[in-house]
Image (tube, helix red, strand yellow):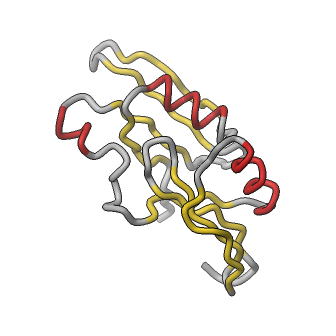
């Protein structure tokens, strides 16, 4: 049997502001933005450039319960992990674009890592892994 994780849903306030932030600030690519008339919503998918199949489905909140979870999908823990081949390049680029790092870079046995917030407050690790196993 062969399986892989292909999408993670991220609840957002607005499709267009989320697309602008993920593509304009983080440099992700917009993979799909298709209106689904039978569901009355858009299917919006972004992913880091060169990421292969792993992507994020930007899911616009459609009711008050979903709105309450925007920015809090992991209860204040790091939610997503963005791997890079050049930590310092990406850290500098994100800092220049106003990304808020809430934990400064640390060099650990497993790699170099810092924690940042997305536009809604979800926490991400920016990480360049060493050759150590995951």
Q: Position of residue 103 (x, y in %)?
A: 57, 68
Image quadrant of residue 125?
Answer: bottom right
Q: Position of residue 42 (x, y in %)?
A: 40, 22
**Residue at coordinates 80% horizontally, 61% vertically from top-left?**
88
Q: Position of residue 112 (x, y in %)?
A: 71, 73
**Residue at coordinates 43% horizontally, 43% vertically from top-left?**
120
Query: In the rendered image of this protein, does residue 81 appear above or below residue 111?
Result: above
**Residue at coordinates 68% horizontally, 70% vertically from top-left?**
105
Q: Position of residue 54 (x, y in %)?
A: 56, 49
Which residue is situated farthest in the top direction here? 37
Q: Quadrant of the C terminus?
A: bottom right
Name the side, left or right, on which 98 lies relative to 93: left
Image quadrant of residue 40?
Answer: top left
Query: In the rendered image of this protein, does residue 3 appear above or below residue 97?
Result: below
Name the side, left or right, on which 63 lies relative to 33: left
Asked whether 111 or 47 is in front, the reply is 111
Name the side, left or right, on which 74 lies relative to 23: left
Asked whether 66 or 43 is in front, the reply is 66
């Amino acid at each position: 049997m062969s399986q892989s994780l292909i999408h993670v849903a991220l609840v957002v306030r607005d499709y267009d502001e989320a697309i602008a932030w993920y593509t304009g600030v983080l440099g992700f690519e917009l993979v799909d933005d298709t209106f689904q008339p039978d569901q009355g919503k858009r299917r919006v998918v972004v992913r880091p450039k060169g990421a292969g199949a792993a992507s994020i489905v930007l899911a616009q909140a459609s009711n008050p319960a979903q709105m309450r979870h925007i920015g809090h999908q992991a209860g204040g823990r790091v939610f997503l992990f963005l791997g890079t081949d050049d930590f310092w390049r990406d850290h500098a680029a994100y800092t220049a674009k106003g990304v808020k790092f809430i934990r400064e870079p640390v060099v650990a046995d497993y790699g170099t890592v810092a924690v940042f917030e997305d536009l809604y407050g979800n926490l991400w690790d920016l990480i360049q892994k060493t050759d150590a196993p995951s």
